[in-house]
Image (cartoon, rainbow, N blue to C red):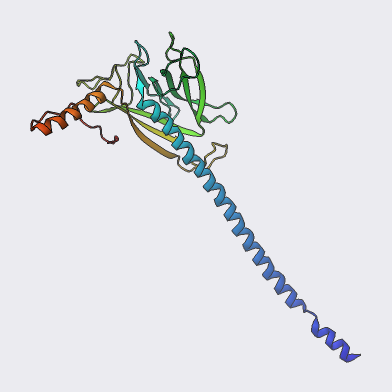
Amino acid sequence: MKLGFSKQAARAFTLIEIVITTALMSVVLASAYICLNAGLASKKVIEARADVLQNGRVALARMSADLRAACPLSKKIEFLGMHRVLGEMTADNLDFGTHNYTPKREHEADFCEVSYYLQKGEEDGEFNLWRRRDPTPDDDPVGGGTQEEIATGVKGLRFEYYDGFDWYEEWGDATGKRQSSNREQPNLYGLPDAVRITLFLEANGSGKKGATNEPPMVFQSVARLYLAPHSQKSTSSSSSSSSSESTGQAEPAAGQPFPGGPQ
């Protein structure tokens, strides 16, 4: 009987061994949970940032495409860029005409009225980027048409306009304030040579309430207006310069390239 009892006792675990094993398993499980939680949090951040990058690229691509084919909006308003501040946020407005439009109905041409602006959402109270399009010109060139949401969670929108010499925050005479470069092409009428777009988007990609205090992600692009008179003049001047070089005669350039613009 004593021999059997001793063999059974030898096969059992002591209380100290059970306590040590339980502690080690707890440490391993806690470490695994921390690693898994960190991985899931990183995945959410990466997916959110990817959404922000995609939204920013799409928004800049749409605005740049419309601006590259920009044309006068109407006889009274050719191109209108308004500098606006809502609280501490820059929220500029832009109105112009464009030929970047595919007719969808009868009696429509490729001309379309376009507006870009920020508007606060009804559900989350965050500002979103909207585009207005109206392919049927009427007496109200800055109203009517359909509206579509381009980007969400916007923390700022800035447009800057280049007249061949300087950059300006406004273009056109929307508020009666006359701002001019005092050069050959004052910015009270006509089309600018280029528009610099700066878009600020919420870093977490959602514009949700309770967002972190991370700085917004900044997207910037410069769009040349190919239908602007100055751009056409520069293109024709380049052709003339090429022909003059072949004949050995030099001609002065018609304009200066804008800084920060596409080559």
How many numbered discs sit on the rendered protein?
0
Q: Residue at x 25, y 28 (%)?
A: 166
In which image quadrant can residue 56 be found?
top left
Location of residue 152 in the rendering, given as x and y in whole percent from the top left corner: 51, 33
Q: Name the side, left or right, on which 123 lies relative to 175.
A: right
Query: Which quarter of the figure is the N terminus placed in?
Result: bottom right
Q: Which of 15 and 66 is in front in this view?
A: 66
Q: Nearer the viewer, residue 154 or 52?
A: 52
In which image quadrant can residue 65 be found?
top left
Location of residue 90 in the rendering, given as x and y in whole percent from the top left corner: 41, 29
In which image quadrant can residue 211 be found?
top right
Q: Residue at x 65, y 66 (%)?
A: 28
* Residue located farthest toward the top when viewing the structure as drawn: 139
Query: Which quarter of the figure is the C terminus placed in?
Result: top left
Location of residue 69 in the rendering, given as x and y in whole percent from the top left corner: 36, 24
Q: Residue at x 44, y 9 (%)?
A: 138
* Residue located farthest toward the left when viewing the structure as drawn: 248
Location of residue 119 in the rendering, given as x and y in whole percent from the top left corner: 50, 25
Above-or-below relation of 226 to 41: above
Above-or-below relation of 218 to 34: above
